[in-house]
Image (cartoon, helix red, strand yellow):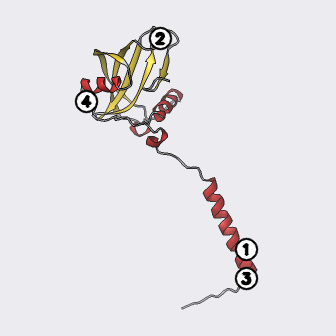
Amino acid sequence: MFICTVKASSIKFFAVLLASVTALVLLVALVPTYEKASEAAMINTDYSDMETNERRVAFIKSFGYEVNELNYEKETVTIPEKFDAVYKRYNDIQRAQGLNLKKYKGKTVTRYTYYLTGYPNYEGKVAFTMLVYRGDIIAGDVSGLDGDGFVHGFVID
């Protein structure tokens, strides 16, 4: 058995201890914290069980919109593996409403598009779009389709 002893003066010992504590405090203070997507916006909305037209229409109406219940489009789309600038901005809208597309990259999803009637302060055609994966809404928006148009999350800005 080999034993090695080192003598250090009390001043050196406390200097090293102080430097270590200071480094630890700086590390904790400077490391950024990241919030979960579900905590990005405190919204109590049920995004699950959207497999029937009745559930999707009820979801749309829960935001106060009037909708043409029978006139909707259903398409299959694939979320890209790599987001371009447009998808990054779109995902910012999703994160603001408690959703996040990042974990669905490369997945094939169903896009439902409903057309709203009586959207406030807009005369053109307005679409309510939702992306559904395994029965759950993973993203969506409300967008004006005429003129300059607009796009925002489910809640009116």
Dot 3 falls on a residue whose secondary structure is helix
Q: Mark 2 points at which residue?
A: 122
| Residue kind at label 4, given as amino acid type | Glu
In this picture, residue 73 sits left or right of residue 35: left
Disc number lying in front (2 or 4): 2
Pointer 4: what residue? 51
**Mark found first going from the N terminus, 2 or 4:** 4
- The residue positioned 30% from the left and 23% from the top of the image is 57
Residue to which mark 1 is pinned: 15
Which residue reaches farthest bottom?
1
Label 3 vs 1, first from the N-terminus = 3
Which of pointers 1 and 4 lies earlier in the amino acid sequence? 1
Q: Where is residue 18 in the image (x, y as percent from the top left)?
A: 70, 70
Q: Earlier in the sequence, mark 4 or mark 3?
A: 3
Marks 2 and 1, how far apart in space? 68 Å
Q: Is mark 4 on a helix, strand or loop?
A: loop
Which amino acid type corresponds to the residue marked 1 in the rendered image? Answer: Ala
Kindly state the secondary structure of the residue where label 2 is placed: loop
What is the C-alpha distance between the residues marked 4 and 3?
Answer: 71 Å
Q: Is disc 3 surrounded by few (<14), some (14 to 19) or many (20+) residues within 10 Å? A: few
User: Residue 64, percent across and down?
Assistant: 38, 22
CA–CA distance between discs 1 and 4? Answer: 65 Å
**Does residue 89 appear to the left or right of 108 in the view shown?**
right
Residue hosting label 3: 10
At label 3, which amino acid type do we have? Answer: Ser
